[in-house]
Every structure is written in C-alpha cells, then in structure tokens.
Image (spheres, rainbow, N blue to C red):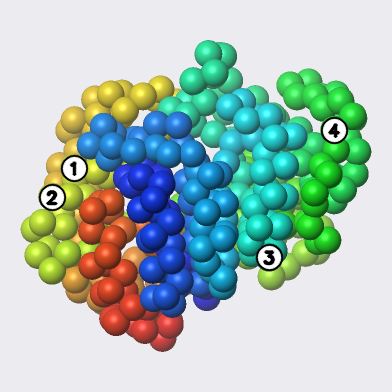
Amino acid sequence: MRIGYTLMTEQAGPRQLVADAVRAEEAGFDLAVISDHAFPWLDSQGHSPYAWSVLGAVAHATSRLELMTYVTCPTMRYHPTVVAQKAATVDLLSGHRFTLGLGAGENLNEHVIGSWWPPAPVRQDMLAEALEIIRPLLAGETVDFEGEHLSAQHARLWDVPDEPPPIGVAVSGPEGARLAGERADAMIAVQPDAELGRLFDAAGDGRTNRPRIGQVALSYDTDAAVARKRAHEQFRWFASGWPVMAELPGPGNFAAAAQSVREEDVAEQVPCGDDVDAHVEAVRKFVDAGFTHVALVQVGGDVQDPFLDWAEAELLPALRRL
C-alpha cells in the first residue's frame, strides 16, 4: 500500500502547501495529492490557491514524492487541451512522478465561468469526451476532435514526456466505475466500496492490478475535544454525500446544507484525536476494499506541522504494518 498526504488547497495558502509537501516527503509519505478548487467548501476553511502553480513548485522542491491531482475537472473551467498541457509540464518538471486525476467536477468550482451546470449523466459524457482529447495529446499526437460537448482543432503539445503520465478517474457509482475501467489507468474514490473496484476491473478488458486510490480524512490533536471541534467547523460539508455536494454552488450553500450536522456526526466519520488505532482502522477499510493507495487529509491548515511530526513518529509506522 502507498500512503499519501493531501495538499488541501481549501485550507492553506500556496507557500504553506509547498512547505507541507516538503515536510511530508521528509516524514516518509509516498505521494502527495492536491485538490483543484476555485472555492473552499466552507468560509471557515478560507483558502483556494491555484493548484497547478503549487504543483509546479512542489515538483521543484521535492525529489521522491509522487504527485497527483485529486481531482481536476477537464470539461468546463479548464478545457481538456489546457489540462493536457498542464499535466505534461508537471510530469516533466517532476521527473515523471505525476498522475493526472480527473473527475466530472462540482458546481462549487465550475460555476465561475458563468455557464449552466449540466446534470450528472451529461457531465459523465463530457468527461469521456475530454479523455478522448487528453490521452492522445499526452502521447504527442495532433488532435482534431468534434464531440457532442467538446471539441479540439489541430491541438498539439510541444513538450511531452517520453512516457505519458498515468490517468486516474474519480468514481462514485457504477457508471463512473465503468468509465474509469474502460478509459483510465487508475480508479479514484473517496468511499471504501469494493463493488466499485469490481466494476472497474470488469470494464478493464482484462487489465488487472491497476491502482485504486482512496482518501481518508482525520483530525489529529493531543486533545480529542479540540480535534472534534475543528473537524465539525471545517469538515461538516461532506455529510450530505457526493450526489448533493456536486450540485451546490457556493460555501454558503454548504453551510446551510450542514446546519443540522452535529459535532458527534462528523466524529463518527472522521477519526479525531491521537489514538493511532482509530486512524489505522479508518485506513484499513480501504485496504480491505482492495485499494492500493490511501491519501490522508489532516483537517485544519494551521496544524499540519504537529500532524506531520506525529505521523512520522507514530502513524506511518503503524500504517506500514497493515
């Protein structure tokens, strides 16, 4: 199992994110994944720098850490030709340490271009078309494509790595798992659902042993009450689930949707405190569901240093024993 650290752009500024990535590499994490947002989920998180600039700096400042977007929407705020160019550049800067993680997007981030927000089936179709543009571009080909939703005219990348970076696709249900299985090199999911992995493999035309990359939120603190309070203040937004979260357009909407979420509700889903066993059990659910990579999210931008110190000394050794 590869253990990752999440550079959560919603809760830290760009300079801190780069410093956190360097410290995560020193602590022994295998990879760093980064969220790609225009807005934080809640005002209390307070940040949203441009993920791709941060990735370029992290690629220069680290030497071993694998890097990945978790995830980028390549259909609205960014055109797929632009995403392909960014991915190729980061892969070159990092010495082929980059995986391009893609997803169908959330209204929270894509509404900024002033366009309509498509229903979920249309977003999946758009993602499939984007992959038809991105993959040949990363292979150095010239692309002319005319789809129902997206197009590219005589597109080409002038700087591409010798080997294209892997592409992961985020899934939350059967349709997404099948799309990932057909088109992607890796599956990305935030729920430890073994059925998603089965569908991913079944759609893979015989391809097996492809990475499955999950993510676990935790709130470390030596005072469990402080950890629970922080998790509630900054992470209660996820309680309504991804089908609802994809539709809400702003932090105020997430705050309203989470009004009834209690501190104990969040603590049931996010392990809080410094009990190593509790955090290991949260990761074990993904391991048992067949995931090969799990990225940890420490809640709270101002507590990354103590978390990384604790992770190096206690949590990572315990996770390695899984």
Q: As shown in the figure, which amino acid type bears the numbered disc 4?
A: Ala
Q: Observer-nearest residue: 319 or 69?
A: 69
Residue 225's tag is none
Instruction: Tell me which label, 4 or 3, sits earlier in the chain.
Output: 3
Which image quadrant for residue 205?
bottom right
The residue indicated by pointer 1 is 233
The residue indicated by pointer 4 is 155
State the separation of the CA atoms marked 2 and 4: 49 Å
The residue indicated by pointer 3 is 95
Q: Position of residue 158 (x, y in %)?
A: 83, 44
Q: As shown in the figure, which amino acid type bears the numbered disc 2?
A: Lys
State the separation of the CA atoms marked 1 and 4: 45 Å
Residue 229's tag is 2
Foreground: disc 2 or disc 3: 3
Q: Quadrant of the C terminus?
A: bottom left
Q: As shown in the figure, which amino acid type bears the numbered disc 1?
A: Glu
Residue at image x 62%, y 30%? 78
Instruction: Tell me which label, 3 or 1, sits earlier in the chain.
Output: 3
State the separation of the CA atoms marked 4 and 3: 24 Å
